[in-house]
């Protein structure tokens, strides 16, 4: 088994690295340089037809892409500690939170990155910069909603750190890197971010 990986600040490969760190599991990494467009090479397209990272290659050559799908597979091999819930209710709630993070928080970050950031101007043609900039407000509204949802909680689904928190941490850190900071008045989001960032897996 090996994981086709890209270094920081790429948020999606980091999700899987953080998940592996929480599990205490090591998988060989094969570096694919995004800045050199290696993820769009014929070799990588053969692994992942969308030319994206990460991709997990199993021992028999089977490829799995999409971060949550990769992590679900790894969870089946290494169930402790449980990162997708211990019972049907927890599993449903964690799935709910992971989807909410991807749609409500990650979508405006992705739109800002594609359409308003100078790094992507050469590959996203045309860029719609006014639309891209409009996602700054969408992101801040999503975090304001999240701030209310985190009131009285340690992590998104309660006391346990889960795949949903990993999805959120990778998104918020990438957003900060591209210029979308957490507003200072969102105390619950900031406290959650400090707790998540203090975990050793955040360095993965």
Image (cartoon, helix red, strand yellow):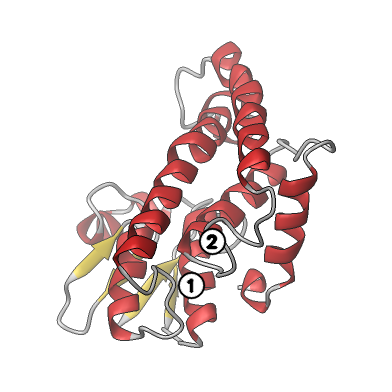
Instruction: In the rendered view, tell whether residue 155 sits above or below residue 120.
Output: below
Q: Which mark is residue 166?
A: 2
Name the N-terminal-most of marks 1 and 2: 1
Which residue in the structure is indicated by mark 1? 19
Kindly identify the residue that appears in the image at 67 percent across and 64 percent down. Answer: 196
Instruction: In the rendered view, tell whether residue 203 sits above or below residue 193.
Output: below
Dot 2: within a 10 Å radius of its alpha carbon, few (fewer than 14), some, or many (20 or more) residues? many
> Percent x, y for residue 5?
45, 67
Q: Quadrant of the C terminus?
A: bottom right
Q: Quadrant of residue 58?
A: bottom left
Closer-to-camera residue (26/119): 26
> Percent x, y for residue 25?
46, 87
The reply, left or right, for residue 39 in relation to residue 127 is: left
Closer-to-camera residue (85/19): 85
> Percent x, y for residue 102?
45, 43
Kindly identify the residue that appears in the image at 17 percent across and 76 percent down. Answer: 61
Instruction: In the rendered view, tell whether residue 112 sits above or below residue 68.
Output: above
Q: Quadrant of the N terminus?
A: bottom left
The answer to whether marks 1 and 2 mark residues whose Cβ atoms lie closer than 8 Å is: yes
Closer-to-camera residue (62/88): 88
Helix, strand or loop under label 1: helix
- Spatial separation of the CA atoms under disc 1 and disc 2: 7 Å
Q: Which mark is residue 153?
A: none
Kindly identify the residue that appears in the image at 20 percent across and 58 percent down. Answer: 46
Q: Residue furthest top?
A: 130
Q: Quadrant of residue 99?
A: top left
């Amino acid at each position: 088994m090996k994981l086709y990986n890209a270094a920081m600040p790429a948020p999606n490969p980091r999700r899987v690295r953080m998940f592996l760190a929480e599990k205490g599991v090591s998988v060989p990494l094969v570096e694919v340089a995004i800045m050199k467009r290696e993820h769009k090479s014929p070799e990588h397209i053969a692994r992942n037809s969308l030319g994206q990272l990460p991709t997990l290659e199993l021992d028999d050559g089977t490829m799995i892409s999409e971060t949550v799908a990769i992590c679900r597979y790894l969870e089946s091999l290494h169930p402790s500690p449980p990162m997708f819930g211990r019972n049907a209710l927890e599993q449903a709630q964690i799935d709910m939170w992971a989807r909410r993070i991807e749609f409500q928080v990650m979508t405006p970050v992705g739109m800002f990155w594609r359409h308003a950031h100078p790094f992507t101007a050469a590959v996203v043609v045309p860029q719609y910069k006014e639309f891209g900039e409009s996602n700054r407000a969408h992101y801040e509204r999503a975090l304001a909603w999240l701030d209310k949802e985190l009131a009285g909680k340690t992590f998104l689904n309660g006391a346990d750190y889960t795949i949903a928190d990993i999805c959120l941490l990778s998104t918020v850190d990438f957003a900060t890197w591209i210029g979308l900071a957490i507003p200072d008045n969102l105390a619950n989001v900031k406290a959650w971010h400090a707790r998540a960032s203090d975990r050793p897996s955040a360095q993965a």
